[in-house]
């Protein structure tokens, strides 16, 4: 399709706005604290909106809408799981993580286990999760931009990658946070607009929409999974969403951007309410695309369904609404990839370079420089991998990252807080077991190997999460304790609950 001037103008305006925010933040990005966690001065409302921005990614707005339009109720489990995950974070880990961490997840573990091995394996795990999730966002960007402004997919992916690197190298976490806030407000407004227009088509009667979908779709979008393997696969997806979303690195580091644990809890409360409203809108958009646009047309534009929401906007509101919704989706991608890169580059610069290579002697300037170099490297690797994943549904790609986070992060974080016997060896074995098992089973599963799969479930959470916990237990009971590297559990627990270290 030829490039539309309105579309191009809106896209340019979005890019100009994000670059202006970056330039403003760059003047305040002076040291490691401001670069990685915005100096810990983000308010509860600001952080809550930024968390919403992180979770309302391209995989949610584009991918879930596509799954709902083409596969039906299966996609709703992706939505519901995110809300349950945030309840777990709010009730169990938000305050302890804020009290124990500084810049990265490895900092949280190092509050009790002062081992190079612990920091190294957690940094590697953070990078794996980051790159998986990054690929999903870049695929969404490439498909969207190539459709709208008539450029090749690879050009679009590279453009987004370059912008992403600019945001991080210049503006750091402060720029990332405010881009997320602006994007979250834009996306919520766009979701509300689409829901209103869809319901208006059906006389403000949601049941009329669902009836129209049932009549117009060649497949039953409300059908439940039948059979042992489909049922287990659906359960595995739900477990991945509940546990993995709560352990994504770019979500967890948001707790370090606020002044204290009380503000961290408030930011989670804000995020939970806003996300609840946003997730309620997704079935109306997905089913609306199936009923109004048609499944055949959705699949024809992109066989994974990634363009269902923009197509619905064009049908309901013409080229202008199409351009607006697409530009919002583009802003969504820009914001999320910035958050991902800041998490990944922080793991490289703070955990690997500063703590392991420089043994804690790196200056703030050195850490920031290392973080900027790491950001460029992560962007480059993600771009190369995204170029080969053009026709993969981005919600499913993002779920790969969620599976790894659930398998490798959840066991060690839960046991860190609630099991006093956990040791350094247990942490290392648990992270490695969860990471290796989840990645290996994804690679030999039907999502990669199709009908030749060696493992029957697309998402191996039902196996890999228990293996992560088992690895922690086996490493603890069979390994030799390293008491000289471990802070007593009671001291760590006091700090986790109060924010004050025991002297």
Image (tube, rainbow, N blue to C red):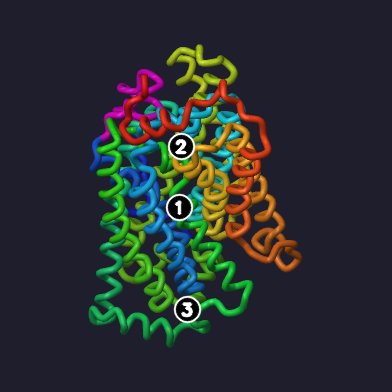
Name the disc covering residue 471, or none.
none
Is 415 covered by the magenta stretch? no
Q: Main secondary structure of the magenta part?
A: helix
The residue that mark 3 highlights is: 221
Q: Residue furthest bottom?
A: 215
Callout 3 crowding tier (Cα within 10 Å): few <14, some 14–19, many ≥20 = many
**Residue 36 percent across, percent down from the top left:** 41, 28
Say if mark 3 contacts mark 1, CB within 8 Å: no
Q: Is residue 346 visible?
A: no
Left or right of 471? Residue 342 is: left
Residue at the location (45% across, 34% down)? 342
* Distance (Cα) linking label 1 and label 2: 19 Å
Name the disc covering residue 164, or none.
2
Labels 3 and 2: the sequence-earlier one: 2
Residue 280, above or below 19? below
Q: Is residue 481 visible?
A: yes
Say if mark 1 contacts mark 2, CB within 8 Å: no
Disc 3 secondary structure class: loop
Disc 1 secondary structure class: helix
Q: Nearer the viewer, residue 428 or 248?
A: 428
Residue at the location (38% across, 84% down)? 212
The residue that mark 1 highlights is: 149
**Residue 393 percent across, percent down from the top left:** 54, 60
**Residue 177 percent across, percent down from the top left:** 33, 37
Q: Nearer the viewer, residue 404 or 128?
A: 404
**Residue 216 percent across, percent down from the top left:** 44, 84
């Amino acid at each position: 399709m030829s490039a539309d001037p309105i579309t191009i103008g809106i896209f340019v305006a979005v890019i100009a706005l994000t670059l202006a925010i970056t330039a403003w933040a760059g003047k305040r990005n002076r040291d490691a604290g401001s670069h990685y966690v915005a100096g810990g001065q983000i308010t509860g409302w600001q952080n809550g909106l930024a968390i919403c921005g992180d979770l309302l990614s391209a995989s949610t707005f584009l991918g879930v809408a596509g799954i709902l339009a083409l596969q039906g109720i299966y996609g709703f489990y992706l939505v519901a799981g995110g809300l349950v995950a945030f309840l777990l974070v709010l009730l169990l880990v938000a305050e302890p993580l804020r009290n124990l961490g500084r810049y990265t997840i490895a900092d949280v573990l190092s509050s009790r286990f002062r081992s190079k091995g612990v920091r190294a394996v957690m940094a590697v795990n953070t990078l794996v999760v980051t790159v998986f999730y990054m690929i999903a966002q870049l695929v969404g960007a490439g498909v969207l931009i190539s459709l709208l402004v008539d450029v090749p997919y690879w050009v679009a992916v590279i453009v987004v990658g370059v912008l992403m690197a600019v945001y991080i190298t210049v503006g750091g976490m402060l720029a990332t946070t405010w881009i997320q806030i602006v994007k979250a407000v834009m996306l919520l407004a766009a979701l509300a607009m689409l829901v209103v227009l869809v319901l208006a088509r059906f006389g403000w009667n949601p049941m009329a929409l669902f009836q129209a979908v049932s009549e117009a779709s060649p497949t039953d979008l409300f059908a439940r999974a039948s059979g042992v393997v489909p049922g287990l696969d659906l359960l595995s997806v739900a477990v991945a969403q509940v546990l993995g979303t709560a352990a994504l690195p770019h979500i967890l580091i948001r707790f370090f951007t606020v002044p204290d644990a009380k503000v961290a809890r408030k930011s989670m409360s804000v995020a939970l309410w806003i996300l609840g409203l946003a997730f309620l809108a997704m079935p109306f958009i997905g089913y609306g695309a199936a009923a109004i646009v048609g499944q055949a047309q959705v699949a024809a534009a992109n066989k994974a369904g990634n363009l269902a929401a923009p197509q619905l906007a064009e049908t309901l509101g013409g080229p202008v609404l199409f351009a607006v919704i697409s530009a919002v989706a583009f802003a969504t991608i820009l914001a999320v990839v910035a958050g991902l890169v800041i998490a990944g580059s922080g793991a490289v610069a703070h955990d690997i370079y500063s703590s392991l290579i420089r043994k804690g002697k790196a200056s703030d300037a050195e850490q920031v420089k290392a973080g900027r170099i790491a950001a460029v490297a992560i962007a480059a690797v993600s771009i190369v991998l995204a170029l080969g994943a053009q026709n993969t549904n981005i919600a499913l790609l993002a779920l790969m990252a969620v599976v790894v986070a659930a398998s490798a992060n959840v066991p060690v974080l839960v046991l860190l807080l609630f099991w006093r016997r956990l040791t350094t060896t247990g942490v290392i074995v648990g992270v490695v077991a969860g990471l290796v098992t989840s990645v290996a089973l994804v690679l030999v599963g039907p999502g990669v190997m199709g009908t030749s799969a060696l493992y029957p479930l697309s998402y191996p959470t039902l196996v890999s999460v228990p293996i992560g916990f088992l690895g922690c237990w086996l490493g603890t009971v069979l390994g030799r304790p390293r008491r000289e590297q471990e802070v007593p559990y009671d001291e760590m627990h006091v700090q986790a609950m109060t924010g004050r270290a025991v002297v």
